[in-house]
Image (cartoon, helix red, strand yellow):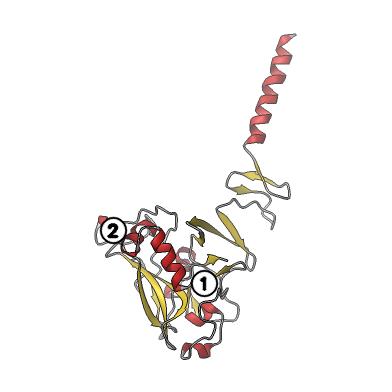
């Protein structure tokens, strides 16, 4: 008589463990610890990810200090626009590095601002970013690099540990903050491309003058995150920061 009771207890314990291992979203759809569900809009996305409502692309995100950053380059294909491109015009590079955008496309402002100052200055500009996110200002980039120990060594901590061609193992990224920066290269206004695999460039929302905008870059030659300014009609990667 004791064996059926023991079997019942074992089955109950197994069911409890199975229930504890599931994660449920707000609608009650179940999934594993990294997602799951039925593949529709209610699919569970864990706290390290979010979904761009425009095209249903899922991105990783990471909290660094008081900021929340995308942990991947943006890969939003702007409708009816030819100024956002894949490196080398190859779709596989968009999948790996995200898309490259000229500055006015990244900001979602008129092309006339390629040669005139934009009056919005350093406001939180959504631009090409998902709803609730914006293109980081130069000051927000500085806040990030200051938090991770200063621009001179921030690149080593923010770069992905894979995907870069290095001149020395000393400069290999540790991805200590899970920012996972990758070397997506850039596109120029003439349609050419350069520096994938060893340089990554990211726009800011802050202009230097009517023709140039500040940006950040990381490379295979050192462990820094450098700041410079460049022509607005070049095409760089975009990382968004949450509002």
Task: Please give left or right for residue 35 compared with residue 121 in the image.
Answer: right
Q: Quadrant of residue 2?
A: top right
Q: Secondary structure at mark 1?
A: loop
User: Where is residue 233 shown, x and y percent of the image?
Assistant: 44, 84
| Position of 188 relative to 42 (above/below) | below
**Separation of residues labelled 2 and 1 (CA atoms):** 27 Å
Query: In this figure, which residue is indicated by the disc labeled 2?
Result: 171
Q: Nearer the viewer, residue 17 or 211?
A: 211
Do tag 2 and tag 1 residues touch (Cβ < 8 Å)?
A: no
The first of marks 2 and 1 along the sequence is 1
At mark 2, the secondary structure is helix
Seen at 28% across and 63% down, the residue is 222
Q: Nearer the viewer, residue 19 or 232?
A: 232
Residue 188 position by quadrant:
bottom left
Q: In the rendering, at what x and y percent does residue 157 appear?
A: 37, 56
Residue 169 at x, y percent in the picture: 26, 55
On screen, residue 138 versus residue 50, left or right, reads left
Outermost residue, top direction?
1
Residue 97 shows in the view: yes
Q: Where is the C terminus found, in terms of image quarters? A: bottom right
| In this view, the mark in front (2 or 1) | 1
Q: What residue is drawn where x is 34% and y is 64%?
A: 151
- Residue 202 marker: none
| Quarter of the figure with residue 42 | bottom right
Q: Which residue is mark 1?
A: 135
């Amino acid at each position: 008589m004791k064996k059926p009771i023991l079997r019942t207890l074992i089955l109950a314990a197994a069911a409890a463990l199975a229930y504890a291992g599931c994660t449920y979203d707000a609608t009650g759809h179940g999934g594993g610890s990294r997602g799951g569900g039925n593949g529709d809009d209610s699919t569970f996305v864990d706290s390290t990810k979010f979904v761009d409502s425009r095209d249903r692309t899922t991105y990783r995100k990471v909290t660094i200090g008081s900021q929340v950053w995308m942990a991947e380059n943006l890969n939003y294909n702007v409708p009816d626009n030819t100024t956002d491109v894949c490196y080398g015009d190859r779709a596989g590079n968009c999948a790996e590095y995200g898309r490259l955008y000229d500055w006015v496309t990244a900001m979602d402002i008129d092309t006339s601002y390629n040669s005139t100052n934009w009056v919005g200055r350093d406001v939180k500009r959504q631009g090409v970013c998902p709803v609730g996110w914006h293109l980081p200002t130069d000051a927000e980039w500085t806040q990030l690099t200051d938090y991770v120990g200063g621009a001179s060594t921030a690149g080593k901590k923010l770069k992905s540990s894979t995907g870069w061609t290095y001149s020395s193992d000393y400069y290999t990224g540790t991805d200590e903050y899970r920012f996972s920066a990758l070397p997506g290269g850039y596109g120029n206004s003439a349609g050419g491309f350069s520096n994938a695999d060893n340089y990554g460039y990211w726009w800011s929302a802050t202009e230097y003058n009517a023709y140039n905008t500040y940006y950040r870059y990381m490379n295979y030659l050192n462990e820094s995150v450098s700041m410079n300014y460049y022509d607005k009609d070049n095409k760089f990667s975009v990382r968004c920061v949450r509002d």
